[in-house]
Amino acid sequence: MPAWNQKLQKYVRDGKLVVLGIAQEQHPARNRLFAQWHNIDWPILHDPINLMQVAGVPIEVAIDEHGIVRSMRPKAETFEQDFIDKAFSPAAAELPGKRVKATRPDLAALRRRAEQSGSADAWRELGDAIVLWGGSAKVNDAIKAYTQAIEVKPDDGDANFRLGVCYRMRYESEQRTPADFQAAVDHWTRARAINPNQYIWRRRIEQYGPRLTKPYPFYDWVETAAREIEARGEKPVELKVLPTGSELAQPDRSFETGEGDIKPPDPQGRVFRDEQNLILMEVTVVPPHAKPGQTVRVHVTLRPNSKKKAHWNNEAEPLKLWIDPPSGFEVQPQLLTAPQGDKPETSETRRLEFEVRAPADASGTAKLSAYALYYVCEDIGGVCMYLRQDIPVTIVVDRE
């Protein structure tokens, strides 16, 4: 799109062309940062649920002054002569009999229609209206609508994908529940199984998945964009949801576990357990099922318990995560550490990610033994302790 933006700017300045973009992206702020970086000043609409049912991007569409689509995927080198400088006449046969003006949907009417008809389409359309017009504030209602659609029609790929989008949306809000991220991955995976050729659905899973399946690093441009925007005297668009390790990771076609004598930090399990749940833990496995010999990426999220006013103690050793895989399974890396906060006491969420490769003869469910070691304090000025939390990780290997 940056190349198209440069080519089309002169036509926009001359009043010959109006440009609009539509992005199938989970996070709208990342769209805005990318547009700011490349000086794209035309409007970009946000379609997180892929309402357009786009199977691949980018798609360029040339629409004339009469509202008629004249070209799909026009060629940049002949765009001026084929479209800009060409006169189009509104042939009667080409114009619709009635023009429809876009209006805010009547959610109450859509709900009544869904309840009365009980059809998957009606419930999905209700979910679409809620998430697009209500946003994260109404995400629970959207989740209920899409869930109803799937109960009626389990093989509705669109409803499964959109439900995954809503679970991830809720996960990034104050309404989150610990299982939301995994629920999002599960529904994206089901959608892809229903239609494995859907590009948008596949990319959403790969975004959070292992390096072996990544086509490219998804958001490695974010840091460069912010730095270059600041260098030209502008303030970069703030990202409330920063890219995670998997979203920054480079693709890799090999699984290297590394060399060296790495020893577990608490081999005898002598460190006291976090029995008060001062640190809350979540585990998400992407994809949720692996084939024999394939790899999954495990996301471990650790949050200080706000109800107990817990916080990290950054004046001691950093948080460590140790993974002990069962026989035949490989882990990379086996020992991880998390960055310390920038103050003696902080309460930020800490995320650690590792990858697991199943053996070629694996099948069924495998349990990985993992544990985190951290310094945590009770309340402000409270007692600080060095604690351990055992973290169960389940890997499902499916031969089918």
Image (cartoon, rainbow, N blue to C red):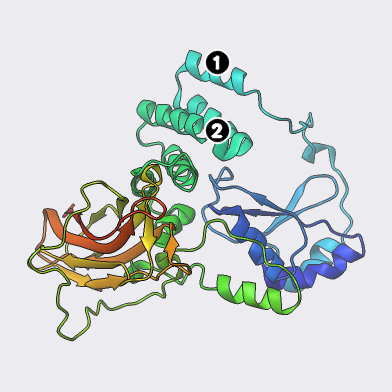
Where does the image place residue 146, in percent across and percent down from the top left? 45, 32
Where does the image place residue 357, in percent across and percent down from the top left? 20, 67
Q: Secondary structure at mark 1?
A: helix
Where does the image place residue 5, in percent across and percent down from the top left? 74, 68
Measure how far apart labels 2 and 1 are at the Cα level. Answer: 17 Å
Among the 4 quarters of the image, the one containing residue 377: bottom left
Above or below, 257 relative to 44? below
Q: Which residue is mark 2?
A: 138
Exactly how many numbered labels are in the figure? Answer: 2
Q: Residue at x 63, y 49 (%)?
A: 46
Tell me the crowding category of disc 1: few under 14, some 14 to 19, or many 20 or more residues within 10 angstroms, Cα based: some
Q: Which residue is mark 1?
A: 112
Tell me the crowding category of disc 2: few under 14, some 14 to 19, or many 20 or more residues within 10 angstroms, Cα based: some
Q: Quadrant of the N terminus?
A: bottom right
Above or below, 305 relative to 345? above
Q: Residue at x 61, y 23 (%)?
A: 107
Where does the image place residue 216, in percent across and percent down from the top left? 45, 72
Question: Could one spot residue 390 in this view of the protein?
Answer: yes
Q: Residue at x 35, y 33 (%)?
A: 154
Q: Nearer the viewer, mark 2 or mark 1?
A: 2
Above or below, 141 relative to 392? above
165 or 378, nearer to the observer: 378
Dot 2 or dot 1: first in sequence order is: 1
Q: Secondary structure at mark 2?
A: helix
Label ID, residue 44: none
Q: Residue at x 25, y 74 (%)?
A: 333
Residue type at mark 2 is Lys
In the picture, measured across the screen, residue 308 lies left or right of residue 100, that is left
Residue type at mark 1 is Arg
In the picture, measured across the screen, residue 344 lies left or right of residue 105, that is left
Q: Are marks 2 and 1 in contact (CB under 8 Å)?
A: no
Direction right: furthest residue: 14
